[in-house]
Image (cartoon, helix red, strand yellow):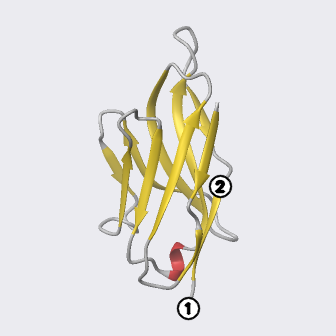
Amino acid sequence: VQLQASGGGLVQPGESLRLSCAASGTIFEIYVMGWYRQAPGKQRELVATITTGSSTNYADSVKGRFTISTNDAKNTVYLQMNSLKPEDTAVYYCNADLRRSRWAGRGEYWGQGTLVTVSS
């Protein structure tokens, strides 16, 4: 299973970015996809998650500014980030909770991370 993240970059405060993460490989079922971030010197933290039933969960710090969504096939997750702030600067990682086969247990998989820098 591979999670390929893209869309990071350098933006000014107040601007927007859209991150994408596509899951590929042998996948039987995806249960939850999400985004986490890790700023320099800090622990990795949850940003947002979405279930295949489209239930969402957001960190308080991003509520009202970020929106998580998936494609119809539920194998690509997006993070629309608006009104970005310098404190949003971090490496953003996508995550998927899935089963690789009917007989396999659920496992967590991580993408490689994409850097988002918010600076004037």
Q: Is 98 positioned to the left or the right of 43 in the image?
A: left
Examine the image and state in which quarter residue 118 appears.
bottom right
In the image, residue 69 sits, relative to residue 74, either above or below, namely below
Q: Secondary structure at mark 2?
A: loop
The residue sitting at 54% across, 47% down in the picture is 21
Rendered position, 107 above or below 19: above
Q: Residue furthest bottom?
A: 120
Residue corresponding to mark 2: 113
Residue 78 spot, x, y in % from top left? 44, 52
- Residue 93 horizontal side relative to residue 31, left or right: right
- Residue 39: percent from the left, percent from the top? 63, 68
> Which residue does the numbered mark 1 point to in the structure image?
120
What secondary structure is marked by label 1? loop
Q: Position of residue 112 (x, y in %)?
A: 68, 50
Rounded to the nearest whole Å, what is the CA distance between mark 2 and mark 1?
A: 23 Å
* Number of marks in picture: 2
User: Which quadrant is the N terminus positioned in?
Assistant: top right
Q: Is residue 77 above or below residue 87?
A: above
Q: Residue furthest top?
A: 103
Q: Is residue 54 above or below residue 31?
A: below
Q: Residue at x 51, y 19 (%)?
A: 28
